[in-house]
Image (spheres, rainbow, N blue to C red):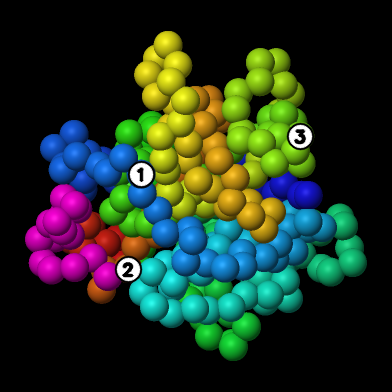
Amino acid sequence: MKLGKKPFVSDERDLKLANYYDHTESPRLPTAHGHADLVKEWGMLGNDEVGDCVLAGAAHETLLLGAEGGHHPAFTDETVLGDYSALTGYVSGDPSTDQGTDVRDAARYRKHTGIEDADGRRHRIGAYVWLEPGNVNQLLHALYVFGTVGVGYELPRSAEEQFAEAKPWTVVDDSPIAGGHYVPAVGYEPGEYTDQGVNTFIGSVTWGRVVSITSEFYEKYCTEALVYVSASALGPDGKTPEGLDKAALLADLKALA
């Protein structure tokens, strides 16, 4: 299994979800949420041999959102690696060119070019908005509103070992960092009780399957998180029933354009 997310560098120009959605004033969330069961096959999409996790994650997110809308796009190793090559300069068979992906660069690529599916169609996003890294409450609300959240981790070696043993990702003290990894979050459900309260399990897709990640792990190792939105998919004018301020978001997007 390969990693491949480049380190996060903040940019003051980034749109922040907190500017458009106040989760403290929104309706109470359901105990569990997610539609990962709508996707029957996630696929490795090259990430077992190449560090294309950011583009593989983009395809996984598109699979889920498409399934929620009644569409079922398909992606292959070849299509995802094609976008990885176009974005990063990766050359198949040349390991020296497998340098990973900057998440912000990938988000721009998804907005302006789009990722290609097996039928040659390009799937573009309308915008991308950043969450506060490690903020679990904001993550859960974003999952409820948008269906999926792209998460960047500085992944500890223990997570690779836990994945191999089909165990949830939990914090293991003193485990060294293996590198950066991009993992789409696709839902949540209650986990075990701790001294700090309920340690929520965050359903996430990586290396071809869904893995449970504890909220404690998310708080400790998340370095960046963002949602991808299309203005046409946000519902009626004004705020959506979940509280997203569409008018303010559209005004900022127009100003940036």
Q: Main secondary structure of the magenta part?
A: loop
Percent from the top left, x then y, of residue 221?
56, 30
**Of marks 3 and 2, which one's residue comes earlier in the chain?**
3
Residue 28 in which image quadrant: top left
Q: Is residue 79 above or below residue 137?
A: below
The residue that disc 1 covers is 32
Task: From this view, report whether residue 2 is shown above or below residue 110.
Answer: above
Tell me which corner region of the image, top left, top right, bottom left or bottom right, holds residue 32: top left
**Residue 174: image x %, image y %?**
70, 15
Separation of residues labelled 2 and 1 (CA atoms): 25 Å
Q: CA distance from mark 1 to mark 3?
A: 27 Å
Q: Is residue 234 magenta?
A: yes
Report the amino acid beneath label 1.
Ala
The residue stretch that appears in magenta: 233-248
> Residue at position x 60%, y 45% from top?
211
Q: Which residue is mark 2?
A: 230
- Secondary structure of the residue carrying numbered label 2: loop
2 vs 1, front mark: 1
Residue type beneath disc 2: Ser
Residue at 37 percent across and 41 percent down: it is 139
Determine crowd level at label 2: few under 14, some 14-19, many 20+ residues with C-alpha closer than 10 A. Answer: few
Q: Which label lies toward us, 1 or 3?
A: 1
Q: Which of the image's four quarters has the C terminus?
A: bottom left
